[in-house]
């Protein structure tokens, strides 16, 4: 198999060693652990990886082109489908961007409910990331435990808005449905149940498992400078010890009313900024999310119509905005350009996984193929939002 | 730093760089001259008072034909400084027939993929980019889909596109 | 009549058929057991559709595999590709020829029984290498290379531990080794702290190394689904894949049987008073307990990376096995 035809004016063609023979290996679009249709072209010297070239675009569905023909309320269901594991957060990002342009203030009740569903979705998304992190490394059981708990969250969402995965719940100016009767109690019971599960089941079984640590510690180390330069965000950024969270540092909602802390990697096992730290940040964030949910449910107003501030027509004023929110994967940014008409002029989505993925070549030098799988798992990518 | 202060600082270092300023915009931005972009990028990243370590997002836009002008392309990127917590948008307007823009991928590595996407979907050619090729569309796709005048081809490699 | 039955021309095909039946039933049972046990550990039910509680699931799967299209991609080395599953299966199959199912009843009671078992099970490596190479698939090649490295490396601690058992038992014949563990479970090599405690350690070493020999997690890198799609059997489909699948479970049982014979008394009952329960039941009961333990470990642990795997073998197990051999021998000499 020729190596030349696959490297077209590549910037990172590795130097050939005295052996001169690198093998091109395709972790092709269909692969059990590339978290979607991602093609990783590996150049390997035996088991050691010399360079990685990710090829994306297999899931490109022309989201941005569609947006130019849809009104903002019609765009909201499309935002669900980008990062399909964290649909609430996608909706929220778009809704906040539009509301800022419109200068629209949503009612208190809506703010609190938005926080609750966004954090529940954060937990659900992290459960997938954590479960698949283990699954990629051969730990078959924690995956099922994570999905069992995630099912409970999806059941909540189904009760609230009718859908398990793609919600179209957070609208510009409000929400599509109110919480049904008794929802608060169910969620609070889940919080208690789940917190015990993290401590008694997940941590002993997976997080502190000697083999799991051996596979993840010291692998794929990202320094804070690299993280900022490559546009990393979310748990991948915080895993390197950087205390930066958009919920606190670039506020877009009412997170300042709650007591919670930003979870940061500390290099507990192995090196600071390695795969284990990125994984551990997700586990810690799940616990923080539980705390936020409890506080939000305790403080939320029960009266009010969630649709009262939803405008009958959303006509964005002339101008452009770049507005970002914190999804489970990191910084989701919407760059919206409007010319004052019914339809937006341009909607560009800055997906967190898009930037998170491009660091993989940088941090995989000298890693083995098994390590590439571990790094990819810890970066937590969703091809839906990378390709849009 | 406030926007006015940022602007003053930039103007002091590179007087001809900033063509327009838009402090009133929802996300304040400046329009810069194309030729000055490389120097400006380095200034924005390396000057300790500015210290824009993160490039949040780089997008391309197709500006439709305005009053008296033909249609043009624009490349805009938004920067953020984790230390000073200030933001800035930097826009460059390009000719739509020959849209060449200096690349900032050497300054902020994250721009590598964002610029590839702008090239792929809008046709903006980033000079100095280490590896400018399509990223979302197939490598042999013709045309740049996000342009306003884009027409989907009838077939792709013999397959009809409806 | 018994003389006729003892002649080679009757006994060889007869025992081959019996063992083939044993292996097939074992596969049906083991696969079902694995799916159910793993399901219960993972808080779910497992097969429930085919037959009451899914008992017929494996049978139906076997039928499905038989009906599948036999795909041989272009570029595959046909003779090697077709031969490989049979070699792998044959090697696992042959180990059963020397295991005693009951007192004095082995298909072929060789006086170098255990040596034969180890030697013939090494053929699996050749079959896997053939499968990986002939597939014309880089992923299969990776799986095959890893598997070869792993199997060959882990044979060293296994051989050393087996040597210590042979030394204590005084014979390489599997029947003799079983007989030497008569009297109750406190006399079993793997449990007798008073007989020779180093053999207990040897049992542990054997257990770990056997996981590596049969490519089970945490040593299942050769067929790591999440990295190599299917490892050395990626390109196999239909009946050939079924044969690989069958031989994996046959191998597990073979290794379980060897462990039982070497360390758990083989067909010996727990206590002489329970001797009315037939020998084969004891043998299979213990072997399946061993297999269950292997499945339990698979469900709990992630897999080791290839360099970590080699580290465990050469830097942990081999020194430990050497220690067992030397110190066990000294114990036998001075105390036993």
Image (cartoon, rainbow, N blue to C red):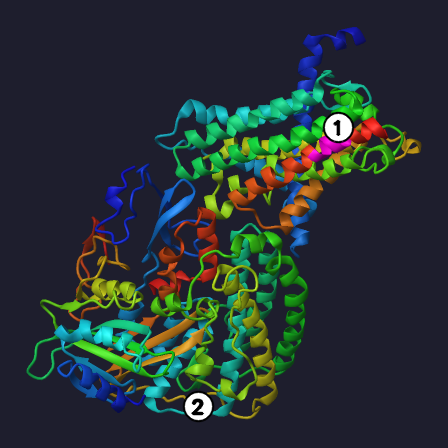
Quarter-of-image position of residue C332: top right
Quadrant, the N terminus of chain A: top left
In which quadrant of the rendered image does the C terminus of chain A lie?
bottom left
The vertical placement of A60 against A1, above or below, is below
Q: Is residue C327 magenta?
A: yes
Which residue occupies the foreground of this view, B111 or A162?
Answer: B111
Dot 2 alpha-carbon crowd within 10 angstroms: few under 14, some 14 to 19, many 20 or more: some
Residue that extends furthest to the right in the rendered view of this protein: C273
In which chain is the residue bearing label 2? A
> Residue at horizontal 47%, vertical 47%?
C227
Whether residue B145 is visible here, answered yes or no, is no
Q: Name the residue under label 2.
A: A106
Q: Which of B18 and C55 is in front in this view?
A: B18
Residue in the foreground of this view, choosing between A264 and C177: A264
Our reading of the magenta stretch's main secondary structure is: helix
Q: Which of the 4 quarters of the picture holds residue B92?
A: bottom left
Left/right placement of residue A159 relative to residue A365 reads: right
Q: How far apart are marks 1 and 2 (CA)?
A: 77 Å
Instruction: Give the residues drawn in magenta, as a range.
Output: C323-329
Which quarter of the picture shows residue A148?
bottom right
Pointers 1 and 2 within a single chain: no
- Is residue A9 located in the magenta-colored stretch of the structure? no
> Considering the numbered disc 2 on the image, is that residue within a helix, a strand or a loop?
loop
The residue depicted at 19 percent of the width and 53 percent of the height is: B155
Q: Which residue lies furthest to the left in this view?
A: B68
Which of label 1 and label 2 is nearer to you?
1
* Label annotation for residue C165: 1
Give coordinates of residue A311: x percent, y percent. 37, 89
Secondary structure of the residue carrying tag 1 is: helix
Location of residue A15 with respect to A175 vertically, above or below = above
The spot of residue C266 in percent (x, y) is: 79, 29
């Amino acid at each position: 198999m020729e190596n030349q035809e696959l490297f077209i004016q590549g910037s990172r063609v590795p130097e050939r060693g005295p052996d001169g023979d690198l093998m091109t290996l395709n972790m092709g679009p269909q692969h059990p652990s590339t978290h979607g249709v991602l093609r990783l072209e590996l150049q390997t010297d035996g088991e050691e990886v010399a360079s990685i070239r990710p090829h994306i675009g297999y899931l490109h569905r022309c989201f941005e082109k569609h947006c130019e023909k849809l009104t903002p309320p019609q765009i909201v269901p499309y935002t669900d489908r980008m990062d399909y594991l964290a649909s609430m957060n996608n909706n929220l990002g778009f809704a906040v961007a539009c509301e800022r342009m419109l200068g629209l203030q949503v009612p208190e009740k809506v703010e609190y409910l938005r926080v609750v569903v966004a954090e529940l979705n954060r937990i659900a998304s992290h459960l997938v990331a954590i479960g698949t992190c283990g699954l990629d490394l051969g730990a078959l059981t924690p995956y099922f435990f994570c999905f069992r708990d995630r099912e409970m969250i999806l059941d909540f969402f189904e009760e609230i808005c009718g859908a398990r995965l793609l919600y179209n719940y957070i609208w510009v100016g409000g929400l599509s449905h109110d919480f049904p009767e008794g929802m608060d109690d169910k969620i609070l019971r889940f919080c208690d149940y789940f917190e015990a599960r993290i401590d008694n089941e997940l941590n002993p079984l997976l997080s502190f498992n000697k083999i799991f640590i051996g596979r993840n510690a010291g692998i794929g180390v990202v320094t804070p400078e690299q993280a900022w330069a490559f546009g990393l965000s979310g748990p991948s950024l915080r895993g390197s010890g950087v205390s930066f969270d958009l919920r606190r540092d670039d506020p877009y909602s009412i997170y300042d009313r709650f007591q919670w802390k930003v979870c940061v990697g500390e290099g507990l096992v192995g090196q600071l900024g390695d795969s284990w730290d990125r994984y551990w940040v997700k586990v810690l964030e799940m616990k923080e999310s539980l705390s936020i949910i409890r506080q939000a449910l305790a403080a939320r107003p029960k009266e009010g119509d969630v649709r009262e501030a939803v405008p009958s027509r959303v006509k964005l004023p002339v101008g452009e905005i770049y507005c970002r929110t914190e999804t489970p994967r990191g910084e989701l940014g919407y760059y919206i350009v409007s010319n004052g008409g019914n339809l937006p002029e341009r909607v560009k989505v800055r997906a967190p996984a898009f930037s998170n993925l491009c660091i993989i070549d940088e941090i995989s030098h000298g890693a083995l193929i098994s390590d590439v799988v571990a790094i990819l798992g810890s970066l937590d990518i969703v091809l839906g939002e990378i390709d849009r | 730093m406030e926007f006015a202060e940022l602007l003053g600082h930039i103007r002091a270092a590179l007087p001809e760089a900033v063509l327009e300023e838009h402090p009133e915009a929802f996300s304040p931005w400046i329009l810069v001259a194309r030729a000055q972009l490389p120097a400006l990028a380095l200034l924005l990243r390396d000057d300790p008072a500015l210290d824009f370590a993160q490039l949040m997002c780089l997008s391309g836009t197709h500006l439709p034909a305005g009053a008296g002008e033909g249609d043009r392309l624009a490349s805009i990127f938004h920067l953020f400084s984790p230390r000073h917590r200030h933001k800035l948008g930097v826009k460059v307007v390009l000719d739509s027939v020959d849209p060449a823009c200096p690349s900032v991928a050497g300054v902020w590595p994250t721009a590598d993929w964002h610029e590839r996407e702008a090239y792929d979907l809008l046709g903006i050619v980033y000079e100095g980019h280490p590896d400018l090729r399509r990223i979302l569309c197939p490598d042999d796709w013709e045309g740049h889909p996000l342009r306003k005048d884009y027409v989907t081809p009838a077939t792709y490699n013999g397959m009809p596109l409806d | 009549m018994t003389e006729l039955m003892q002649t080679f021309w009757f006994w060889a095909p007869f025992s081959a058929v019996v063992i083939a039946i044993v292996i097939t039933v074992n596969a049906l049972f083991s696969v079902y057991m694995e799916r159910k046990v793993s399901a219960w550990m993972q808080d779910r039910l497992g097969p429930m559709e085919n037959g009451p509680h899914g008992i017929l699931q494996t049978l139906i799967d076997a039928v499905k595999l038989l009906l599948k299209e036999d795909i041989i991609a272009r570029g595959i080395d046909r003779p090697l590709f077709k031969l490989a599953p049979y070699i792998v299966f044959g090697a696992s199959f042959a180990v059963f020829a020397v295991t005693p199912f009951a007192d004095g009843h082995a298909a072929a009671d060789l006086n170098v029984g255990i040596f034969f078992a180890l030697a013939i099970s090494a053929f699996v490596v050749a079959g896997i290498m053939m499968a990986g190479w002939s597939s014309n698939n880089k992923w299969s090649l990776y799986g095959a290379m890893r598997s070869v490295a792993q199997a060959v490396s882990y044979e060293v601690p296994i051989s050393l531990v087996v040597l210590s058992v042979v030394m204590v038992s005084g014979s390489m014949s599997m029947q003799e080794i079983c007989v030497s563990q008569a009297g109750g479970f406190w006399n079993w090599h793997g449990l007798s702290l008073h007989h020779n405690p180093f053999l207990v350690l040897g049992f542990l070493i054997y257990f770990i190394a056997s996981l590596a020999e049969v490519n089970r997690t945490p040593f299942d890198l050769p067929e790591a689904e999440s990295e190599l799609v299917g490892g050395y059997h990626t390109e196999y489909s239909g009946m050939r894949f079924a044969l690989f699948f069958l031989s994996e479970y046959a191998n597990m049982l073979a290794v379980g049987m060897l462990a039982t014979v070497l360390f758990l008394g083989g067909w010996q009952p727990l206590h002489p008073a329970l001797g009315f329960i037939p020998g084969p039941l004891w043998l299979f009961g213990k072997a399946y307990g061993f297999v269950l333990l292997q499945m339990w470990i698979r469900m709990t642990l992630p897999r080791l990376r290839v360099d970590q795997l080699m580290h465990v073998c050469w830097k942990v197990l081999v020194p430990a096995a050497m220690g067992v051999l030397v110190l066990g021998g000294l114990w036998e000499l001075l105390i036993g």
